[in-house]
Image (cartoon, rainbow, N blue to C red):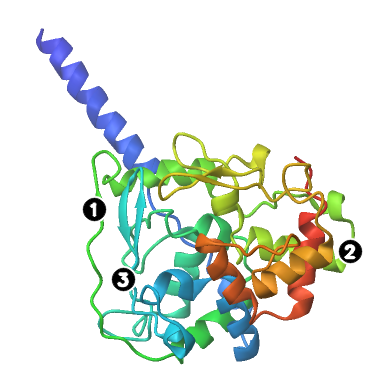
Amino acid sequence: MKRLLLALVANGLIGGAVFWFLTAPQKLDESMFAAIDGHEPDLGNGETLFWAGGCASCHAAPKVSGDAKKVLSGGLVLTTEFGDFAVPNISPSREHGLGNWSFEDFSNAMKKGVSPEGRHYYPAFPYASYAHMTIEDLSDLFAFLKQLPVSEEADKPSDIAFPFNVRRGLGLWKKLYLNDKSVISDAALGDDEQLLRGRYLVEGPGHCGECHTPRSLAGGMQRSNWLQGAPSPEGEGRIPGITNGPDNLESWSESDIAYMLETGFTPDFDSVGSSMADVAANYAFVPASDREAIAAYLKIIQP
């Protein structure tokens, strides 16, 4: 019996050590930052990425409009089957926001889902999509965020039940679902610059797949069903597919899609609602060429 107990304890310690090793937060290689030495942040591009990424939709106070959308005080609560996630303040506040963050802190949050303190972020923050962003674009976006208005609003607490509140376990989730490999391959797009730009926006900053792609039981995007529609992550109903299939966008032209992204109006004289209305409000500030690139990309996605 003693031998059995000792064996169980030893196996438990070994298993715990293996779990701790496998789930350790992983940061970006330092060489990635050296590669952009001398890069001068482009605030215009940073603002484009701000709107394309929907930063205000989650991080501004709920239901604000106009310039208030640039006050990223947080406050929205995302209600999901895994728990209630309170969206944080990401204004330049030194106490409550990003004011004390370095660019390395920001990049590791965006591409690796790791906080400045070295803890895993929950993927309610869509870093599984932002992982596709270039380090130059992150530099531009960070510079834009740093010059926005300061909010001293304190973050609300999230409410996450066991076992999902064991944050360390997200290291295993990331091994399954976090990578920067494109969903649609280079071979499928060739050297078409418009399609490549569309892929970058949809798969990266636009994070369209986060809502429009079904998820596994563990909450990871099922890339084999890319953009084919999914249950709403925040309640009842279903988010439609946006592939070029007969039940999705097959009857829409590229100009129809681009126009909807600019105005919120569909080809049948209806208007989009719910969170898609916020997407259209954001993309009205994105260059027309980017809306057209997204439309071209979506029209090649087959169900």
Instruction: Classify mark 3: residues with Cα within 10 Å, few (<14), some (14-19) or many (20+).
Output: many
- In the image, what residue occupies the spot 15% across and 11% down? 3
User: Is residue 20 at least partly visible in the picture?
Assistant: yes
Foreground tag (2 vs 3): 3
Amino acid under disc 2: Asp
Give the spatial CA distance, label 2 vs label 1.
45 Å
For the residues labelled 1 and 3, say whether their Cβ atoms are less than 8 Å apart.
no
The residue carrying mark 1 is 159
Amino acid under disc 1: Asp
Which structural element holds mark 2? Answer: loop
Q: Residue 246, how many percent across, how many down?
A: 78, 42
User: Which image quadrant: the C terminus?
Assistant: top right
Choose the circle earlier in sequence order: 2 or 1.
1
Nearest the camera: 141 or 134? Answer: 141
Q: Residue 49, how many percent across, how many down?
A: 60, 77
Give the answer, above or below, for where 53 lies relative to 232.
Answer: below
Instruction: Classify mark 1: residues with Cα within 10 Å, few (<14), some (14-19) or many (20+).
Output: few
Q: Residue 176, how many percent across, how many down?
A: 52, 40
User: Is residue 196 at least partly visible in the picture?
Assistant: no
* Horizontal side, residue 35 vs residue 186: left or right: left
Give the spatial CA distance, label 2 vs label 3.
41 Å
Label at residue 75: 3
Give the spatial CA distance, label 1 vs label 3.
14 Å
Q: Residue 15, how many percent across, how many down?
A: 30, 30
User: Which image quadrant: the N terminus?
Assistant: top left
Label at residue 236: none
Choose the circle earlier in sequence order: 1 or 3.
3
Foreground tag (2 vs 1): 1
Label at residue 192: 2
